[in-house]
Image: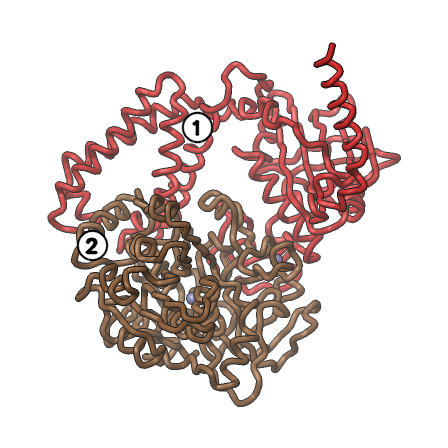
Chain colours: A red, B brown
Amino acid sequence: MATGTKRQEQGEAAEQSAQAAPELVVKDGLTGPEAPANGREFGGDGRQNALKKYVDEEQLARGLGWFSIGLGLAELLAPRGVAKVAGMRGNTGLIRLFGLREIASGIAIFAGGRRPAGPVWSRVVGDALDLACLGAAYATPENDKARLTFATANVLAVTALDVLCARQLGADPDGAQTERGNVPVNKSIVVNASAEEVYQYWRDLENLPRFMRYLESVKVTGEGRSHWVAKAPGGSVEWDAEITEDRPNQSISWRSLEGSEVETSGTVRFEPATGGRGTVIHVKLDYNPPAGVVGALVAKLFGEDPDAQMQIDLRRFKQIVEVGEIVVSDGTLTGEGYTEQRPAQPLGVGLGAAAGQLQK
Amino acid sequence: MRANCWYGKKDVRVEQVPDPKILNKRDAIVKITSTAICGSDLHLYNGFIPTMQAGDIMGHEFMGEIVEVGPEVHDRKVGDRVVVSFPISCGKCFFCEQELFSLCENTNPNAWMAEKLFGHSPCGIYGYSHLTGGYAGGQSEYARVPFADVGTLKIPEGLDDEQVLFLSDIFPTGYMGAEMCNIQPGDTVAVWGCGPVGQFAMASAYLLGAERVIGIDRFPERLKMAREGAKADTINYEEANVYETLMELTGGRGPDACIDAVGLEAHGAGAHGFEYIYDRTKQALMMETGRPIALREAIMACRNGGTVSVIGVYGGFIDKFPMGSFMNRSLTMRTGQCHVQRYWKKLLGHIKDGDIDPSFVITHRMKLDDAAHGFDIFNNKEDDCIKVVLKP
Ligand SMILES: [Zn+2]
Ligand SMILES: [Zn+2]
């Protein structure tokens, strides 16, 4: 068939030009020999649902909806009180308008159906982060300064809840389910160093506790085997692990030995960043603790947001590689969490107290 | 040592605190000889920036003498007289390598907090909330300076503190505001806000070749300083319609570049009265974190294809952004916390050559112990206060 032949010719021509292409392309990151193939789809692994155990998002959405309506009613019915807070006079009409807007936002959440992700996202974007930013200004009573930190932390926590809620409402409820109790961690970071350099650092597993805050120690006990001790508030958890795959400068995988109290596995991949901009490190961990005390301890290791914890740890790793040590401030000498922060003023301790000793 | 500590809204106190020590190997300890109160400190003072903690030492504009260095400090030694940059930068990361120092990836240990609010984190900053690292500030007798090789500028003999102190922040910040405008010979540049940063933006616009510079404010003493110190024309927005006046001055075309040196606490008058109340109310009700009156006006006034440069500080979200005007007229917006270390050597050269003497913005000098009084009059614009320098 004529058309078929023509198509065939076009196909051949395309093939020829494709073969000729490598000579024309100089180097642009996308076509380098080590670059990943493009045209991939991401985000289909059902991880949103893995977080489900932390909160019933539909219930939370309803709570946020009621909050909007409550605030709106307060503005509508008691504009003078709100005006007093705002340090203004005589603008009650305007505040009533805001009340209506707030009520509308609350109603939108209920009208959004069983899974109102849209309205909750608008809450997150439009209001909740603003709430976090202004919490400090709003909540500081002139005569009770100690409440400020507490209030700020609370407001930020609410923001996190909003985000979590919206994320989960946006996830497909019929997607893959992760077993209840499983703690998945999946994070990445770019480091300004070669894959060889960062691989070497990770390959010595005993380095991991330097930047992974939940690890007390890792001891290499034999060929590919190691003993891990993790510390949680109220006790420690131990297990033995073995390296299951070791591809120099590319990836390392490990898994807890059969019969360990904690079932865990992890993989770290090292991928050249585009344009020669260092190395992208992808970390994937899974902890599948048993029921009971040990399980509860493992859950505590990672807190409510395991990915966020890992992000902090990876940033510490990046600091070790790029500047040689973990950078501390006066405020984070005793830890980076909300509750661990101390005032930004000297503690009266010196070098050696840095690099995390105080944090442990 | 004595240090100015934050305790809450409009509550700062000079107190006795422990002396700073070397915590990381590239740290230096600086004995402070001069330190300043910045307009952006007022955002903390008025409670607009979250994550402050009672006892936080304030201040990010300071200079002094190095009295101790960590084992990995190579280019500075005890006895060096230095100005400290407000961004804390490692010098090794992707952004530092591109001289985008205020975006350093390694110096904010609380980057996770900033990521929640901004999506990504800027660098660590002295005395500027836990969102930017929880570093003790420089309104004190001594300060710990991380990455001292990157974050200090050696000052040669013959220049006094007041001439070079502002290389720590406001002079480079104003300069970057003007530099981002890509000024061409013959350009007209309008600057909203004639506070210290605005003054340096105006002076820098001339250094970069602008032909005409117009300053906009409502305080007579600031407008006077703009005319006499920065040699700009001025508009008092309480007396004139800014947009109309600018069109009148530019034949209806608008300024080639507009600089917002006001930021999140803008005020408004006349036609903006309602706009101000609207923004102030939303801000108080936590629906908006800035009052972007100046920014809206800068966008509307800027000529087609012009540049809007934002150096005033914003904290979170703003409302009623005139996107239609911005998009349909091919405007460019450039922004950023200043990459101080990228500019300060060049600006030190300008000071040495006598092109500019930055001390013209100083209106008040006092003891560190009087910091609370300094904040009070600066915040209330009392006694024609424009810039306060504190001596420990
Ligand atoms: Zn400043
Ligand atoms: Zn850096």
Is residue B269 shown left or right of residue A2? Answer: left
- Which residue ends up furthest to the right in the rendered image? A223
Q: Quadrant of the N terminus of chain A?
A: top right
Is residue B106 shown left or right of residue A277? Answer: left
Element type at marker 1? Answer: helix
Q: How many marks?
A: 2
What residue is drawn where x is 47% and y is 43%? Answer: B116
- Residue B272's mark? 2
Spot occupied by residue B65 in the image (x, y as percentages of width and height): 56, 79
Q: CA distance from mark 2 to mark 1?
A: 38 Å
Whether residue A194 is situated above or below residue B80 in the rendered picture: above
Viewer-side residue, B16 vs A43:
A43
Q: Which chain does the residue under circle 1 lie in? A: A
Whether residue A358 is situated above or below residue A208 in the rendered picture: below
Do the residues indicated by labels 2 and 1 lie within the same chain of the protein?
Answer: no
The image quadrant in which ligand 1 is located: bottom left
Whether residue A53 is situated above or below residue B231 in the rendered picture: above
Element type at marker 2? Answer: helix
Spot occupied by residue B179 in the image (x, y as percentages of width and height): 48, 66
Residue A257, picture quadrant: top right
Residue type indicated by callout 1? Cys
- Which residue ends up furthest to the top in the rendered image? A1
Residue type indicated by callout 2? His
Residue A322, picture quadrant: bottom right
Give the labeled residue for mark 1.
Answer: A165
Spot occupied by residue A204 in the image (x, y as percentages of width and height): 80, 43
CA neighbours of label 1 inside 10 A, class few (<14), some (14 to 19), many (20+) = many
Q: Which chain does the residue under circle 2 lie in? A: B
Res B140 visible: no
Whether residue B93 is situated above or below residue A114 in the rendered picture: below
- Which residue ends up furthest to the bottom in the rendered image? B158
Viewer-side residue, B123 vs A201:
B123
